[in-house]
Structures are given as structure tokens and as C-alpha cells.
Image (cartoon, grey):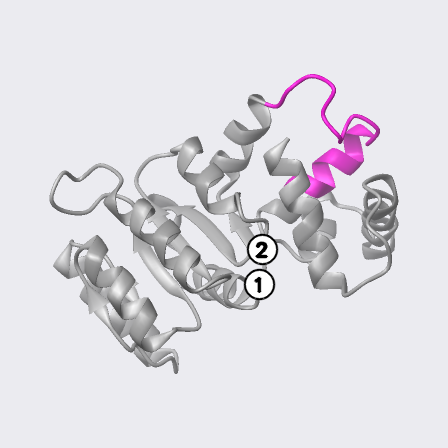
Amino acid sequence: MIADDAVLLREGLVRLLVESGHDVVAAVGDGPSLVTSVLEHKPDISIVDVRMPPSHTDEGLRAAVEARGKVPGTPVLVLSQYVEVSYADDLLADGKGGIGYLLKDRVSDVADFLDGLARVAGGGTVLDPEVVAQLFARRRRGDPLRSLTAREREVLGLMAEGRSNTAIARHLVVTEGAVEKHVRNIFTKLDLPPDDEQHRRVLAVLAYLKG
């Protein structure tokens, strides 16, 4: 489901997704229609613009939060022209994952966009590097991540961007085995017991972002 008041962008996303083999069950241009569509179709994921009519402030975000309240855990990928940290906070508040927040001018690589879409639909968390940077910059002193090493924080930050262990290893120019060791250490230090790997990654990312 797509919610964006910019007709050209909305129709462009519809075409891109359909050509990539996805079904678009609804394409709307305002917040109330977003909520209605989520309740009616219960889509695998909703792509939402933050600013929509009538005030073009935060209608899309508020509608997405409302939709997740009525259909708990419904995956949402927010596309925005600006970094609005409070918006990310509101979406992350329920701790369920299935959240993405990307800046529109970063969505230029179709393969990366579709990969992020799939990760969010699967319950993961995919955030634009600039969103991660701003969330990290305002962390409180004494946060739960103080026991992590600088490298472990770096790995966790890349996890927050939705990168796989392989992609993290490539970015840091280290072996995948080294990344796996850092990830295990992160889970241990954040007291995340053995569980589904994806679930623990989401919990670790949420701890990183919500401190």
C-alpha cells in the first residue's frame, strides 16, 4: 500500500513495484485513506510519505502510527525529504520492528530500495544513515550501550541501516566471521538471549535507537 500526495511519485512507485512482481492493493494521497486502506487490506507493507494534506506537516506519520495501533505490527516504510527524529521515535515506540525510514533523495538505487522494502516487510528495521546519525547524537549519558566497544557500536549502527553481516563486512573491510563475532558480543552485552536471529537483530537495533 502506498500513501503519498505527490501523484507522480506515487504512480512511479506503483509502476516500480508492479514491475518488480509486487501487488499494490491501494495507492492513496492522504492520512485517513492510509488508515482505511491498512484496515481493509492489511498489506504486507505500507510506504508512507510523512507530509500530506491538509497541513503538509505530519499527517502521514500520525496516520501510520494510528494504523499500527489498530493493526499491531503492520510494517511501515516512511519516505521523507527531511530527518524528523521525533517521527522515528513515534514509530519505534511499540518495539515491534517492521519499521523503515528513508530520505527520498537516497532512494536512487532500485535494488537497495527493494531490499530495504523486503527487510521491513519481514519485520526488520531499515533506517537512513542520516536518521541513525541524528538519533545517536542525542543519546543520553549512561545509556545501555555504554558497554559496547567503538567497533561494536559501529556494527550496530550499520545493522540499524538494515545491512546484512555480509554487507557490514564489505563496508568495514573485515571478514564476515569478524562481524559475526561482533554481533554475538552485542547480543551478549545487551542481554539478548538465544532466539531467532532476525528478532534479536531488531531488538538490538531498537535498544540502539531508543536510548
The residue nearer to you, when weighing 114 against 36, is: 36
Q: Which mark is residue 123?
A: 1
For the residue marked with disc 2, what is the amino acid?
Lys
Q: Position of residue 125 (x, y in %)?
A: 56, 53
- Which is more toward the observer, 168 or 199? 199
Q: Which residues are magenta?
A: 139-157
Q: Where's residue 8, x and y in %?
A: 15, 60
Q: Residue at x 21, y 57 (%)?
A: 32
Residue 12 appears left or right of 86: left
Q: Tell me what residue is drawn at x 19 percent, y 67 percent.
A: 11
Mark 1 is surrounded, within 10 Å at the Cα level, by few (under 14), some (14 to 19) or many (20 or more) other residues, namely: many
Q: Which residue is mark 2?
A: 96
- Is residue 155 inside the magenta stretch? yes
| Residue 164 x, y percent position in the rendering | 67, 58
The quadrant in which the N terminus is found is: bottom left
Residue 122 drawn at (x, y percent): 56, 68
Residue 185: say if magenta.
no
